[in-house]
Image (cartoon, rainbow, N blue to C red):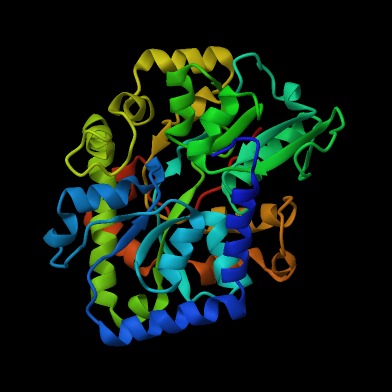
Amino acid sequence: MCLDDFTHTRRDFLKLSAMLTAAGAMPLLNSLQARAAAEPDAPVRIGYLPITDATPLLVAHNNGLFEAEGIQAERPVLLRSWAQVIEAFISGQVNVIHLLSPMTVWARYGSKVPAKVVAWNHVGGSGLTVGPDITDVKQLGGQSIAIPFWYSVHNVVVQQLLRDNGLTPVSKPAGTPLAANEVNLVVLPPSDMPPALASKRIAGYIVAEPFNALAEDLKVGRVQRFTGDVWRNHACCVVFMHEHDLNNRPEWSQKVVNAIVKAQVWTRDNRAEAAKLLSKDGANRYTPHAQTVLDRVLSPAASERQGYLASGAIQHAQWDEHRIDFQPYPFPSYTEELVRRLKDTLIEGDKGFLASLDPKTVAGDLVDDRFVRNSIAAVGGLKTFGLAESFQRNEEYSA
């Protein structure tokens, strides 16, 4: 692709915007209903992007955890864009996906997709990566940075970081002059971000791993800040499932969530092995990434943390965050805070539906935590994930 032409990403966003309307979603939902009627006992069909956000779903498949629960699972389907993920999900081609948490808000309330969040897939696992010559967020003024999608926690976090540093996030066509305090946001697929940074087409990007680690490995960028050091233990991607499965196949749904939760437990205890099985050298070749790059994310050397503390990429040492971590409970306080912050976030396209959303109502309606509570209890409770035994928490956010 030509890195000076971002029109393909705009087309992708417009395609997704069209699908996530009542009219655009209708034929896909009709297909979903037809599939559900024709195959009421459908196996687990996972759709995913090749990012570490998908780890629990892929580990559950690789380790036979769905079969151990007594349900069938097909090989996960690798998709190339969020538009493909949404299209495959709404039409019923896949029935379990990881999806950007803000995108679930858009899907359910902007276009009435009958689906719910059943668990978190991971926490943290993202970062703001900048060119090697940039050492301060303020230096991004007058330049462009890439985000993976408008409805992403990356977009929410980076805009707060920019504002806290006296900068104004904007969305302007390529080539438009920028004021010294403006930072232009462009949407790019994660795989296009490191080459765009290397060619200086952008000054930085904020995205899921392992694309921050890849920039480090290629020596084309450095991590300016980890998102988990800004919003402590924030969700990024969540597990999204169809309501018809949750309501009509509750036993099957429980077993799906059981497998995903057990995969998270296993991953926490076997980080290096998880990196290997996800890599291009793993038996299933789930992702195109080298194990050395995935190791930096899942199983980093202790010395790396000291370097991030010294550089300021980590500013809250007391939080003791992993670069990526795994715990499945979808805390309501996070969903409430996310909705509040989305209302004040620059987002291209129609975001009018956000104005009428009540954060507390969304937290209770968007999320179905029946299954994950049972799954967590079965593996020993929240303490298994290093958490206090409480399904409530206070959000900690400090840029």
The part of the image, by quadrant, that contains residue 240 is: bottom left
The residue lying toward the viewer, choosing from 43 and 115, is: 43
Residue 380 can be seen in this image? no
Residue at horizontal 79%, vertical 36%?
175
Residue 62 in the image: state x and y as whole percent.
19, 48
Q: Quadrant of the C terminus?
A: top right
The part of the image, by quadrant, that contains residue 3 is: top right
The residue lying toward the viewer, choosing from 262 and 59, is: 59
Residue 168 in the image: state x and y as whole percent.
81, 37
Residue 204 in the image: state x and y as whole percent.
62, 29
Q: Is residue 268 above or below residue 237?
A: above
Residue 326 in the image: state x and y as whole percent.
36, 43
Q: Report whether 156 appears left or right of 84.
A: right
Looking at the image, the residue that sits furthest to the front is 2
The residue lying toward the viewer, choosing from 288 and 355, is: 288
Q: Quadrant of the N terminus?
A: top right
Residue at horizontal 49%, vertical 24%?
215
Q: Is residue 49 above or below residue 146?
A: below
Q: Is residue 134 above or below residue 160?
A: above
Q: Report whether 318 appears left or right of 322.
A: right
Residue 7 can be seen in this image? yes
Residue at horizontal 22%, vertical 70%?
43
Residue at horizontal 28%, vertical 33%?
275
Number of dots carrying numbers: 0
The residue lying toward the viewer, choosing from 276 and 199, is: 199
